[in-house]
Image (cartoon, grey):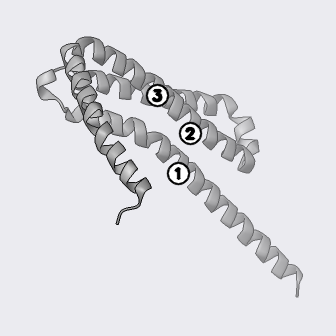
Amino acid sequence: MIPRRAQELIILGVGVFTPLGILAVNGSAFLMRHLPETRIVLAFGALLSGLLLNGLAAYAGHRRARRHVPDILHEYRWWIWSLIVIVVVGSAVVGAYFTYLGLEDANRLPDRTAVIAAAFLLLFPFAITIAARRLEEGRTARGRAGQRRTARERAP
């Protein structure tokens, strides 16, 4: 016997599935008819998304680096900030451009270029964050190992 709450949730799920499917199909048909306008909007959205996500990841990486190598960051701050801006803006522009190119022809959808651009826009910030964490973990482990050696040297 299925509990009453589960029955209600199943009925609700089945009841909501069809109207949502109808909305999705009609929304997709609308977007396909207005693909030139849609591709501009989506390319702009990809640019904005890339700037925001990559900017947050770069900020997190810079914040981690500030804890471990503040002298280097202070000494080369203009070069480092210039590099950060170039990478963040460049990757966002590349993602937006390939999104725009990938939505050129409705008959070729789903397009490999647009899918790769979307995957790049999603995965690049994660790659930046993972790389920053790996560098932090490696630096922390080396720092701990150095502290252990000096403590051992003092003991005998």
| Lower position in the chain sequence, tag 3 or tag 2 | 3
Q: Is residue 3 left or right of residue 11?
A: right
- Where's the N terminus, which quadrant? bottom left
- Mark seen at residue 57: 2
- Can you say whether 141 is above or below 154 in the image? above
- Image quarter of residue 155: bottom right
Q: Amino acid at mark 1?
A: Ile
State the count of labels: 3
- Give the distance between the C-alpha atoms of the residues marked 3 and 2, in whole angstroms: 12 Å
- Mark seen at residue 130: 1
- Provide residue 146's location: percent of width, then percent of height: 75, 69
Q: Amino acid at mark 3?
A: Ser
Q: Residue at x 23, y 13 (%)?
A: 34
- Can you say whether 6 is above or below 107 in the image? below
Q: Is residue 117 left or right of residue 54?
A: left
- Image quarter of residue 118: top left
Circle 1 Cα neighbour tier, 10 Å, few/some/many (<14 / 14–19 / ≥20):
some
- Can you say whether 153 is above or below 54 in the image? below
Circle 3 Cα neighbour tier, 10 Å, few/some/many (<14 / 14–19 / ≥20):
some
- Mark seen at residue 62: none
The residue carrying mark 3 is: 49
Q: Amino acid at mark 2?
A: Ala
* Front-most of residues 4 and 13: 4
- Provide residue 12's location: percent of width, then percent of height: 36, 43
| Lower position in the chain sequence, tag 3 or tag 1 | 3
Q: Residue at x 32, y 37 (%)?
A: 16
